[in-house]
Amino acid sequence: MNEAQMKKRTKDFAKEIINLCRKLPNNREDRLIGDQVFRSETSVASNYRAACRARSTAEFISKLSIVEEEADETLFWLEIIDEMKIFKNVALDTLMKENDEIIAIIVASIKTARKNK
C-alpha cells in the first residue's frame, strides 16, 4: 500500500468512526466514550499525514509510533463499546478488523523504516 492509499484509508476510517460517534446514545458516559474514540481515530489519520511529511527517518518513525499508539487506543474504545453492548446492530467487528489492519500496516512500516535507517 502506498502513501496516498494509506492516507485515504486512514481518513476514510476516521469518517467511519465519526459516523459511529454520531449514533452513540446521548448520555454522559457514551458521550465521553465517543469523545475518546473520536479523538484517537482522527489522530491516527492526522498523524499519518504528518509522518508522510517527516524531515528524517527518525521523525518518520516517531510520528508512526504515535499513529500506532492512537490506533491501539481506538481499538480499546471500540472494544469497550462492544463489550458494554452500547450498540446492538452496528458492525463493530468490521471496524475493529479495519483498525487491526491499520495497526499491522503501521507496525510493519515502523519495522521497515528501522531496518533501512
Image (spheres, rainbow, N blue to C red):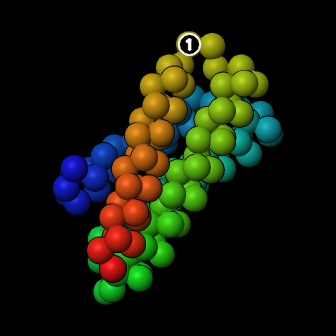
Q: Nearer the viewer, residue 106 or 28?
A: 106
Q: Which of 8 and 59 is in front in this view?
A: 59
The residue located at (72%, 24%) in the rendering is 83
Position in image of residue 6 (x %, y %): 28, 52
Most extreme residue toward the right, as rendered?
A: 28
Q: Is residue 60 above or below residue 96?
A: below
Horizontal side of 104 relative to 37 (left or right) equals: left
Instruction: Point out the image quarter for the C terminus.
Output: bottom left
Q: Is residue 102 above or below residue 66?
A: above
Quadrant for residue 69, please give it: bottom right
Number of marks in the image? Answer: 1
Position in image of residue 68 (x %, y %): 51, 58
The residue that label 1 is drawn on is 89
Quadrant for residue 76, please give it: top right
Which residue type does callout 1 highlight? Asn
Most extreme residue toward the top, as rendered?
A: 89
The residue located at (48%, 75%) in the rendering is 62
Q: Is residue 27 visible?
A: yes
Position in image of residue 43 (x %, y %): 50, 60
Q: Can residue 50 be seen in this view?
A: no
Most extreme residue toward the bottom, as rendered?
A: 55
Horizontal side of 65 relative to 51 (left or right) equals: right
The residue located at (42%, 46%) in the rendering is 104
Horizontal side of 79 relative to 27 (left or right) equals: left
The residue located at (63%, 13%) in the rendering is 88
Position in image of residue 75 (x %, y %): 59, 41
Q: Is residue 52 above or below residue 23?
A: below
Q: Tell me the element at label 1.
A: loop
Q: Nearer the viewer, residue 76 or 20?
A: 76
> Crowdedness of circle 1 by 10 Å Cα count: few (<14), some, many (20+)?
few
